Image (spheres, rainbow, N blue to C red):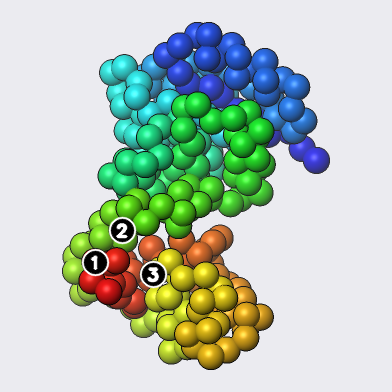
Protein backbone atom coordinates (compact mmCIF):
# COMPACT_ATOMS: atom_id res chain seq x y z
CA UNK A 1 0.00 0.00 0.00
CA UNK A 2 1.38 3.41 -0.95
CA UNK A 3 2.51 6.01 1.55
CA UNK A 4 0.23 8.99 2.24
CA UNK A 5 2.18 12.23 2.60
CA UNK A 6 1.02 15.02 4.86
CA UNK A 7 2.00 18.32 6.42
CA UNK A 8 1.24 19.59 9.92
CA UNK A 9 0.09 23.18 10.47
CA UNK A 10 -0.01 24.39 14.07
CA UNK A 11 1.31 27.40 15.97
CA UNK A 12 2.73 25.30 18.82
CA UNK A 13 6.03 23.66 17.90
CA UNK A 14 5.71 21.13 20.74
CA UNK A 15 2.38 19.99 19.28
CA UNK A 16 3.93 19.61 15.82
CA UNK A 17 6.89 17.70 17.25
CA UNK A 18 4.67 15.28 19.17
CA UNK A 19 2.38 14.66 16.22
CA UNK A 20 5.32 14.18 13.84
CA UNK A 21 6.89 11.59 16.16
CA UNK A 22 3.59 9.79 16.62
CA UNK A 23 2.97 9.60 12.87
CA UNK A 24 6.53 8.42 12.25
CA UNK A 25 5.60 5.20 14.02
CA UNK A 26 2.37 4.79 12.06
CA UNK A 27 2.39 2.77 8.84
CA UNK A 28 1.37 4.34 5.54
CA UNK A 29 1.87 7.97 6.64
CA UNK A 30 4.84 10.29 6.11
CA UNK A 31 5.16 13.86 7.37
CA UNK A 32 6.92 15.89 4.67
CA UNK A 33 6.59 19.39 6.08
CA UNK A 34 5.42 21.69 8.87
CA UNK A 35 4.09 25.24 9.10
CA UNK A 36 3.21 27.51 12.00
CA UNK A 37 0.71 29.81 10.28
CA UNK A 38 -1.69 29.98 7.36
CA UNK A 39 0.55 31.81 4.93
CA UNK A 40 3.36 29.32 5.47
CA UNK A 41 0.88 26.48 5.00
CA UNK A 42 -0.32 27.79 1.63
CA UNK A 43 3.25 28.25 0.41
CA UNK A 44 4.32 24.82 1.69
CA UNK A 45 1.41 23.09 -0.02
CA UNK A 46 2.42 24.69 -3.32
CA UNK A 47 5.97 23.45 -2.81
CA UNK A 48 5.47 19.85 -1.68
CA UNK A 49 1.88 18.98 -2.81
CA UNK A 50 0.99 16.60 0.06
CA UNK A 51 -1.89 14.13 0.10
CA UNK A 52 -3.20 15.54 3.39
CA UNK A 53 -2.99 18.65 5.54
CA UNK A 54 -3.45 18.39 9.33
CA UNK A 55 -4.24 21.92 10.48
CA UNK A 56 -5.40 23.83 13.52
CA UNK A 57 -8.46 25.98 12.81
CA UNK A 58 -7.24 28.90 14.95
CA UNK A 59 -4.17 30.13 13.12
CA UNK A 60 -2.64 33.60 13.41
CA UNK A 61 -3.12 35.84 10.40
CA UNK A 62 -5.13 33.75 7.93
CA UNK A 63 -7.75 31.68 9.73
CA UNK A 64 -7.61 27.91 9.25
CA UNK A 65 -10.95 27.82 7.42
CA UNK A 66 -9.76 30.39 4.90
CA UNK A 67 -6.52 28.47 4.45
CA UNK A 68 -8.60 25.36 3.77
CA UNK A 69 -10.63 27.20 1.12
CA UNK A 70 -7.48 28.48 -0.58
CA UNK A 71 -5.87 25.05 -0.61
CA UNK A 72 -8.97 23.29 -1.94
CA UNK A 73 -9.36 25.83 -4.74
CA UNK A 74 -5.83 25.30 -6.03
CA UNK A 75 -5.32 21.67 -4.93
CA UNK A 76 -8.75 20.00 -4.83
CA UNK A 77 -7.19 16.54 -4.46
CA UNK A 78 -5.64 17.39 -1.08
CA UNK A 79 -7.59 16.18 1.96
CA UNK A 80 -7.76 18.58 4.89
CA UNK A 81 -8.20 17.52 8.52
CA UNK A 82 -8.93 20.35 10.95
CA UNK A 83 -8.35 20.47 14.71
CA UNK A 84 -11.14 22.58 16.19
CA UNK A 85 -14.37 22.83 18.22
CA UNK A 86 -16.46 19.94 16.93
CA UNK A 87 -19.49 21.11 18.94
CA UNK A 88 -19.59 24.43 17.06
CA UNK A 89 -22.26 23.96 14.39
CA UNK A 90 -21.32 27.19 12.62
CA UNK A 91 -17.70 26.11 12.32
CA UNK A 92 -18.74 22.69 11.03
CA UNK A 93 -20.94 24.32 8.36
CA UNK A 94 -18.04 26.50 7.24
CA UNK A 95 -15.72 23.49 7.21
CA UNK A 96 -18.13 21.52 5.01
CA UNK A 97 -18.39 24.45 2.61
CA UNK A 98 -14.60 24.70 2.53
CA UNK A 99 -14.32 21.05 1.50
CA UNK A 100 -12.74 19.80 4.72
CA UNK A 101 -12.66 16.00 5.04
CA UNK A 102 -12.49 15.70 8.82
CA UNK A 103 -12.91 17.84 11.93
CA UNK A 104 -11.37 16.53 15.18
CA UNK A 105 -10.98 18.02 18.66
CA UNK A 106 -7.56 19.39 19.58
CA UNK A 107 -7.27 16.82 22.39
CA UNK A 108 -8.14 13.86 20.16
CA UNK A 109 -6.59 10.54 21.18
CA UNK A 110 -3.84 9.30 18.88
CA UNK A 111 -5.76 6.09 18.14
CA UNK A 112 -8.85 8.10 17.12
CA UNK A 113 -6.76 10.45 15.00
CA UNK A 114 -5.10 7.55 13.19
CA UNK A 115 -8.49 5.98 12.51
CA UNK A 116 -9.70 9.31 11.13
CA UNK A 117 -6.65 9.55 8.87
CA UNK A 118 -7.27 6.03 7.62
CA UNK A 119 -10.88 6.93 6.83
CA UNK A 120 -9.78 10.01 4.91
CA UNK A 121 -7.15 7.92 3.15
CA UNK A 122 -9.96 5.66 1.92
CA UNK A 123 -11.76 8.68 0.50
CA UNK A 124 -14.31 8.96 3.31
CA UNK A 125 -15.48 12.14 5.07
CA UNK A 126 -15.35 11.64 8.87
CA UNK A 127 -16.69 15.18 9.31
CA UNK A 128 -20.07 13.59 8.63
CA UNK A 129 -19.83 11.53 11.81
CA UNK A 130 -19.91 14.79 13.76
CA UNK A 131 -22.97 16.02 11.90
CA UNK A 132 -24.93 12.81 12.38
CA UNK A 133 -23.93 12.19 16.02
CA UNK A 134 -24.83 15.59 17.51
CA UNK A 135 -28.47 16.76 17.21
CA UNK A 136 -27.47 20.39 17.85
CA UNK A 137 -24.75 20.38 15.21
CA UNK A 138 -26.97 18.47 12.78
CA UNK A 139 -29.76 21.04 13.19
CA UNK A 140 -27.37 23.92 12.53
CA UNK A 141 -25.89 22.24 9.46
CA UNK A 142 -29.25 21.25 8.00
CA UNK A 143 -30.74 24.71 8.55
CA UNK A 144 -27.73 26.36 6.90
CA UNK A 145 -28.10 24.26 3.79
CA UNK A 146 -31.87 24.59 3.76
CA UNK A 147 -31.44 28.35 3.52
CA UNK A 148 -29.27 27.87 0.45
CA UNK A 149 -31.97 25.99 -1.45
CA UNK A 150 -33.94 29.11 -2.43
CA UNK A 151 -30.90 30.62 -4.12
CA UNK A 152 -30.51 27.63 -6.41
CA UNK A 153 -34.10 26.64 -7.12
CA UNK A 154 -34.05 28.39 -10.48
CA UNK A 155 -31.11 26.22 -11.49
CA UNK A 156 -32.43 23.00 -10.01
CA UNK A 157 -32.25 19.97 -12.25
CA UNK A 158 -34.48 16.91 -12.33
CA UNK A 159 -33.74 14.50 -9.51
CA UNK A 160 -32.27 11.19 -10.68
CA UNK A 161 -33.75 9.46 -7.63
CA UNK A 162 -36.96 7.46 -7.45
CA UNK A 163 -39.75 8.56 -5.12
CA UNK A 164 -38.84 5.77 -2.71
CA UNK A 165 -35.17 6.77 -2.75
CA UNK A 166 -36.18 10.36 -1.98
CA UNK A 167 -38.24 9.10 0.97
CA UNK A 168 -35.25 7.17 2.26
CA UNK A 169 -32.93 10.14 1.81
CA UNK A 170 -35.29 12.49 3.68
CA UNK A 171 -35.32 10.08 6.60
CA UNK A 172 -31.52 9.83 6.48
CA UNK A 173 -31.40 13.64 6.59
CA UNK A 174 -33.72 13.60 9.62
CA UNK A 175 -31.18 11.44 11.46
CA UNK A 176 -33.01 8.12 11.25
CA UNK A 177 -31.01 4.89 11.43
CA UNK A 178 -31.38 2.17 8.80
CA UNK A 179 -33.49 0.16 11.22
CA UNK A 180 -35.78 3.12 11.92
CA UNK A 181 -36.15 3.83 8.20
CA UNK A 182 -37.02 0.19 7.55
CA UNK A 183 -39.67 0.26 10.26
CA UNK A 184 -41.20 3.56 9.12
CA UNK A 185 -41.37 2.53 5.46
CA UNK A 186 -42.29 -1.08 6.24
CA UNK A 187 -39.37 -2.51 4.28
CA UNK A 188 -36.42 -4.69 5.25
CA UNK A 189 -33.14 -3.37 6.61
CA UNK A 190 -31.36 -4.84 3.57
CA UNK A 191 -33.73 -2.99 1.25
CA UNK A 192 -32.83 0.26 3.01
CA UNK A 193 -29.14 -0.51 2.48
CA UNK A 194 -29.82 -1.25 -1.19
CA UNK A 195 -31.65 2.06 -1.60
CA UNK A 196 -28.79 3.98 0.04
CA UNK A 197 -26.22 2.26 -2.17
CA UNK A 198 -28.29 3.20 -5.21
CA UNK A 199 -28.58 6.81 -4.01
CA UNK A 200 -24.83 7.15 -3.54
CA UNK A 201 -24.15 5.58 -6.94
CA UNK A 202 -26.66 7.77 -8.81
CA UNK A 203 -25.45 10.96 -7.13
CA UNK A 204 -21.76 10.03 -7.41
CA UNK A 205 -21.07 10.87 -3.76
CA UNK A 206 -19.12 9.00 -1.11
CA UNK A 207 -21.50 8.93 1.83
CA UNK A 208 -24.94 9.68 3.24
CA UNK A 209 -24.30 13.21 4.41
CA UNK A 210 -22.86 14.29 1.08
CA UNK A 211 -26.02 12.91 -0.54
CA UNK A 212 -28.23 14.85 1.87
CA UNK A 213 -26.38 18.12 1.33
CA UNK A 214 -26.40 17.65 -2.46
CA UNK A 215 -30.13 16.89 -2.55
CA UNK A 216 -31.07 19.72 -0.18
CA UNK A 217 -29.12 22.30 -2.14
CA UNK A 218 -31.07 21.34 -5.24
CA UNK A 219 -34.41 21.34 -3.51
CA UNK A 220 -35.04 17.62 -4.05
CA UNK A 221 -35.76 17.01 -0.37
CA UNK A 222 -37.04 19.11 2.51
CA UNK A 223 -36.09 18.29 6.06
CA UNK A 224 -37.93 19.26 9.23
CA UNK A 225 -35.66 20.32 12.07
CA UNK A 226 -36.23 18.76 15.53
CA UNK A 227 -38.31 21.70 16.81
CA UNK A 228 -40.57 21.44 13.76
CA UNK A 229 -41.45 17.79 14.30
Circles 1 and 3: CB distance less than 8 Å? no
Q: CA distance from mark 1 to mark 3?
A: 12 Å
Mark 1 or mark 3, which is nearer to you? Answer: 1
Residue at x-position 75% and y-position 22%: 25
Residue that lies at the very extreme toward the top in this rendered image: 13
Provide the secondary structure element on which disc 1 rests.
helix
Residue 154 in the image: above or below residue 125: below
Q: CA distance from mark 2 to mark 3?
A: 9 Å
Q: CA distance from mark 2 to mark 1?
A: 9 Å
Q: Tell me the number on the disc at residue 151.
A: none
Q: In the shown orientation, is residue 142 left or right of residue 116? A: left
Q: In the shown orientation, is residue 112 left or right of residue 229? A: right
Image quarter in which the N terminus is found: top right
Q: Tell me the number on the disc at residue 139.
A: 2
Task: Give how far across and how far down residue 10 sits, in percent.
Answer: 45, 18
Work out whether residue 171 or residue 20 is closer to the camera in this orientation and state it. 171
Circles 2 and 1: CB distance less than 8 Å? yes
Q: Which residue is mark 3?
A: 174
First of labels 2, 1 by sequence position: 2
Residue at x-position 50% and y-position 52%: 129
Residue 117 image-quadrant placement? top right
Residue 110 visible in the shown view: yes
Provide the secondary structure element on which disc 2 rests.
helix
Give the crowd class for mark 2: few <14, some 14-19, many >=20 residues within 10 Å.
many
Q: Tell me the number on the disc at residue 227.
A: 1
Task: Give how far across and how far down residue 94 sits, in percent.
Answer: 32, 44
First of labels 2, 3 by sequence position: 2
Q: In the shown orientation, is residue 221 left or right of residue 5? A: left
Residue at x-position 50% and y-position 42%: 102
Residue at x-position 28% and y-position 44%: 90
Amino acid sequence: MSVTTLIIVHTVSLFRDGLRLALAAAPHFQVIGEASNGQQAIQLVDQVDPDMVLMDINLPGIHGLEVARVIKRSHPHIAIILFGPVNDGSAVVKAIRAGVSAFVPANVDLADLLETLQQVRRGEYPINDIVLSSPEVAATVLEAFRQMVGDEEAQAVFSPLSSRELEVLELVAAGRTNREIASQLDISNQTVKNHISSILRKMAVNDRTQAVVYAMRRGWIKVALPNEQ
